[in-house]
Image (tube, coloured by chain):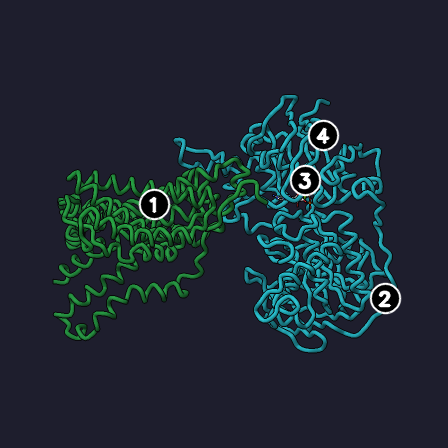
Chain colours: A green, B cyan
Amino acid sequence: MFQQILIAALFSMLQFGTPILIAGLGGVISENSGVVNLALEGIMRMGGFFAVVGAYYTGNPWLGLALGIGMGAVMGLLAAWVTVSWRGDQVVYGVAVNVFALGGMTYLLQLFFNTTGHSPPVSSFSSGVVISPTFAQGLLVFLVVGLTYAVVSWSMARMKRSNAKKTLILTAVIGLPLGIAFSFFAPAREVVFGAFNKQTIFVYFALILPFLLHFLLYQTKWGLRIRAVGENPKAADTLGINIYVIRYACVILSYVFGAIAGASMSIGQLDIFDNHMPAGKGFIALAAMIFGKWKPLGTLAAVLFFTLAGVAGDLIQGLSTTYPVLASIPRGWLNAFPYMLTLLALAGFVGRAVPPAADGIPYEKGEK
Amino acid sequence: MEPVIELKGITKQFPAVLANDHIDMSIRKKEVFAIVGENGAGKTTLMNIIYGLYQPDSGKILIRGKETRINGPHQAIAEGIGMVHQHFMLVPVLTVAENIVLGIEPTKAGLVMDMDRARKEVAEFSQKYGMPIDPDARVEYLPVGMQQRVEIIKALFRGAEILILDEPTAVLTPLEREGLFLTINALIEQGKTVIFISHKLNEVMAIADRIAVLRGGRVMGVVDSKETSEAQLARMMVGRDVVLDIAKNPQKLGELVLEVQDLRAKNERGLDAVKGISFHLRRGEILGIAGVEGNGQTELIRVLTGMAKAESGKVLVNRKEMTGATVKSLRRAGIAHIPQDRLRTGLILPFNISENIVLGMHAEPPFARGIVQQRAEVNRFAKEKEDEFDVRPRDITVKAKSLSGGNQQKVIIAREVSSGPEVMIAAQPTRGLDIGATEFVHRKLLEERDKGKAVLLQSLELEEILSLSDRVMVMYGGEIVGCFETKTTNEDELAHYMLGLKRQEHVKA
Ligand SMILES: Nc1ncnc2c1ncn2[C@@H]1O[C@H](COP(=O)(O)OP(=O)(O)OP(=O)(O)O)[C@@H](O)[C@H]1O
Ligand SMILES: [Mg+2]
């Protein structure tokens, strides 16, 4: 009984968290290079819509996704052109994209599908990926090792001892045995199997992405350059680093992530575009990015926290049949729970959130 | 010796000024070539052109005899040119090693950073040049002298043969400066060439082989350091004789205006920085604070000006307790502040000169009526002050960020002096200023004193303190370890106290 509720909760947690995490990581990559991206909400909406359009006309969800990504890339290029090359105000531009996406997609919904509600069903990824118990076992090991890695690298940074090699060794020594031990523990395996069976490919993407991005930002030369450009572009410039190339790349990638996040809702969880999409998830993604201190693994932790709070409501409702007292908690309060936690957390539990020093400031060559 | 860099007719026009006007110059291999000139003479602009940060409007650059177009820093680096900028170009949150290898990172498989190798290379490299440094230290926690070391290693690490140092000594303590000079000599020994910019003529005379003097964007002459004198250089720079020693009028001591009792404060990292300081300041007096950087002077001034809170103790202005008062009420009470960090606390860089000049007075008549700004009045006032304080260019619409360092300082001083203070707190007011401007600031501070105002002068330059103050107190380890009548002391004596070798039993300050 409890296991069933847990599986259901985890299942919806993964669903709820996937678009937020992907979009939040889009924010991370852009802002680490020093460009504020407030357009995530709008770009999710556009990506989600065009993914449906693509899938509708080709009958192939992959091509739909490709169209969504293409749309994101084009919008990203435009954003970079306006805010990086022409030094337009990044906040104003982001708000403009959100407003445009709101009205524009409503209009296009009318134009393409002759409705203001939602599009007709299209071929999608929503049936999910059927997995085998063995796969679930492997997945469990991956999850434990990944979480260990996040915790280890966070505590190393806390102790000002960041060191890539030591982090890896510690993770292997602690995480691997732990993960393998867990994977022979049947209930854990069943929970993972239940939570992941028939999830969409986007969920897997979202699980790998924070680690990929962490690797990119902190282990590669491109990451070092991105962070340098976000902190002190002038210094990077004097070393011959091309700030424009880096910011363009990061902004475009950011918009592509936003578009994928949108597609993960429209042709991932569902098979339609609904005119309410993405219903504020882009803004939660921004909050997660800030909460996660502009770091990929931090953002992962923030999203876990938010979604946990989000499904807490479902969990409590599920349990209220066995424990009637719980039924007396008003549903609205439970719905507001994640947002209240967010406010509290941002109000001081995580310490000061310091963005990259040059975040939001356009760079002009040859300026003092 | 063959020239490594030749400049021919380099010209650069900025919207408001002709920064470089047909500059011809040739720099030889293995020499220390100094460039001096007033604030705004165009030194930094010229160096930025050599480093590829600016493109000249006309003119040619020859490197090792070959005409070269330097399109950007990457090309300058490829030509073996390295530059340590007047305002450091470091990424504070990154480590020393990360800052140094940025852009030329050692990698495994072409993409993954090989930090172990970077660390090792940086450590070896810094040993080789006699500038040891911890590769894992975060740059933001390093003292300025060390940050400069990182900058120099950064340039050498890229294979710089020609090293440009733009006012490297402005931020250094005397000891750090000695270290830098040793480094420069070592570099020359190894066949490198150094271009050295400074406002301190004695430094230039000591370290340079040849000296170029710039004025108003033009080369006034290039002289051999052995065949010139400080006075001659000063005359070439300014176009008139400069009074290096200013006469002080006899003191007319008035009543008490500022009293500090057993003040304690922490620094930004939460460590005790000011440990029980007491002193008093009277009208008609300049009280100097001497000391090696980092002995609590900055924190003391931050507390006195309301920018930080004291842990305990008292501050009285005109016998009224003002401990913990806000910046605004302290200003109302007559405290003016020339901050040591003009870029961060002294100016709002994207604002223009007129806006910066009325800052702090902008909300009161005659500059505002109710909530409406009186633009005409602001502009009239700014123009008047620009003339009085000789701010160049004479254009109140120029943004503070595109002024040269010295002119930025003049804007601040114009504002603070004209706010009509009772107590002027000046922290390193002549850092980075040319001799003309330094003389000007010194005269202004003495004028304030003669008008019956009180001045608290903090400086790392002993000479400055000795020539201006009536009394000097020395800070060491967050305490005042000695206080002297200027007439009865000298550099040697003060130095002993500054280094903590001596302290007075009962300091009466
Ligand atoms: N980016 C810019 N835009 C507009 N004007 C500029 C810019 N950079 C410099 N200037 C102007 O060009 C002139 C020369 O400035 P520069 O910084 O080269 O002087 P400097 O000799 O280095 O002075 P300092 O000793 O104060 O550093 C100044 O009048 C300055 O206001
Ligand atoms: Mg300069």
Local SS, label 3 = strand
Same-chain status of marks 2 and 3:
yes
Whether discs 2 and 1 lie on one chain: the answer is no
Is A115 positioned to the left or the right of A29 in the image?
A: left
Mark 1 and ligand 1: say if the CB distance to the nearest ligand atom is below 8 Å: no
Ligand 2 position by quadrant: top right
Residue type for callout 4 = Asp
Q: Amino acid at mark 2?
A: Gln
Q: Are marks 4 and 2 on the same chain?
A: yes
Q: Would residue B49 be seen by someone viewing this image from the given angle?
A: yes
Q: Secondary structure at mark 2?
A: loop
Amino acid at circle 3: Ala
CA–CA distance in space, label 1 to label 3 = 42 Å
Mark 4 crowdedness (10 Å alpha carbons): few <14, some 14-19, many ≥20: some
- Callout 2: CB less than 8 Å from ligand 1: no
Which is more foreground, mark 4 or mark 2?
4
Host chain of mark 4: B
The chain identifier of the residue carrying mark 3 reads: B
- Which image quadrant for residue A344? bottom left
Residue located beneath label 1 in the image: A255
Label 1: few (<14), some (14–19) or many (≥20) C-alpha neighbours in 10 Å: many
Write down the residue under mark 3. Answer: B19
- Gap in Å between the C-alphas at discs 1 and 4? 50 Å
- Name the secondary structure under disc 1: helix
Q: CA distance from mark 4 to mark 2?
A: 49 Å
- Residue B491 x %, y %: 80, 54
Q: Earlier in the sequence, mark 2 or mark 3?
A: 3
Asked whether the residues under the numbered discs 4 and 2 touch, taking CB atoms below 8 Å apart as contact, a structural biologist would say no
Chain letter belonging to callout 1: A
Q: Which mark is residue B24?
A: 4
